[in-house]
Structures are given as C-alpha cells and as structure tokens.
C-alpha cells in the first residue's frame, strides 16, 4: 500500500512516501507499529501516545476517508490502499 506523510510527520519520517505490503500491515494499528519500527523513535512519538495508542491529534485517511468514520485503529488495509498521515497544524 502507498503510505504518505504530511507536515511534521514528513519531517519525522524523513520522506513523504513509502510502500508497505498489506501482508505485513493488515490493519491500521499494525501499520503504525511497522512504521514506528522502520522510521524510529522520532516518528513513533508523533504517531503513538506513551500508552501505545494512536494519537488522537493525528488525522489518518485511507483512500481519502478519515479512519474515525471507518473502523479506527482496526481499519483493514489492502495493497491498493493509500494511507495518509496528517499531523495537526496550528497557526494564526
């Protein structure tokens, strides 16, 4: 599947896009673990809380749909999916 990073997450990952096979990350929760393992502590801190839960201030889209309106962390993933991680942006 195509995984895209935006804003601060792009900086933390060191790139804006990566391909991950769905067989190694069949759901969103597993994908976040795979990404944290692959890109290290800097990205992990941006994606998960100290309790290991996916941070609520991160917007995650699967094929353009917010996972909050799908199955959340249990959202199933396929090779043809595009998963986008968008960090919260504040400004004024």
Image: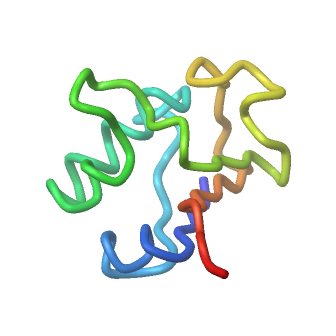
Residue 54 relative to residue 79: left or right: left
Q: Quadrant of residue 34?
A: top left
Q: Nearer the viewer, residue 62 or 68?
A: 68
Residue 86 relative to residue 47: left or right: right
Where 2 falls versus 51 (above or below)?
below
Q: Residue 73: percent from the left, percent from the top?
A: 56, 24
Q: Quadrant of residue 67?
A: top right
Query: Residue at the location (62% across, 78% down)?
Result: 91
Give the total of numbered labels. Answer: 0
Q: Residue 90: percent from the left, percent from the top?
A: 59, 70
Query: Residue at the location (20% across, 47% down)?
Result: 37
Query: Residue at the location (72% across, 49% down)?
Result: 61
Residue 17 relative to residue 68: left or right: left
The extreme left residue here reads 41
Where 30 falls versus 45 (above or below)?
above
- Which colouring convention does the figure follow? rainbow
Q: Nearer the viewer, residue 80 or 42?
A: 42
**Image quadrant for the C terminus?**
bottom right
Q: Nearer the viewer, residue 31 or 42?
A: 42
Query: Residue at the location (16% across, 57% down)?
Result: 40
Q: Quadrant of residue 39?
A: bottom left
Q: Residue 22: percent from the left, percent from the top?
A: 54, 39
Q: Residue 54: percent from the left, percent from the top?
A: 44, 32
Residue 9 relative to residue 62: left or right: left
The extreme front residue here reads 92
Where 64 falls versus 23 (above or below)?
below
Where 32 falls versus 4 (above or below)?
above
């Amino acid at each position: 599947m195509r995984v895209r990073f935006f804003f601060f997450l792009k900086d933390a990952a060191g790139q804006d896009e990566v391909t991950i096979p769905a067989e190694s990350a069949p759901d969103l929760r597993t994908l976040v673990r795979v990404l944290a393992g692959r890109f290290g502590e800097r990205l992990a801190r941006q994606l998960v809380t100290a309790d290991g839960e996916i941070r609520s201030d991160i917007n995650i889209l699967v094929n353009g749909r917010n996972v909050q309106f799908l199955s959340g962390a249990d959202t199933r993933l396929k090779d043809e999916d595009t998963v986008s991680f968008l960090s919260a942006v504040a400004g004024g």
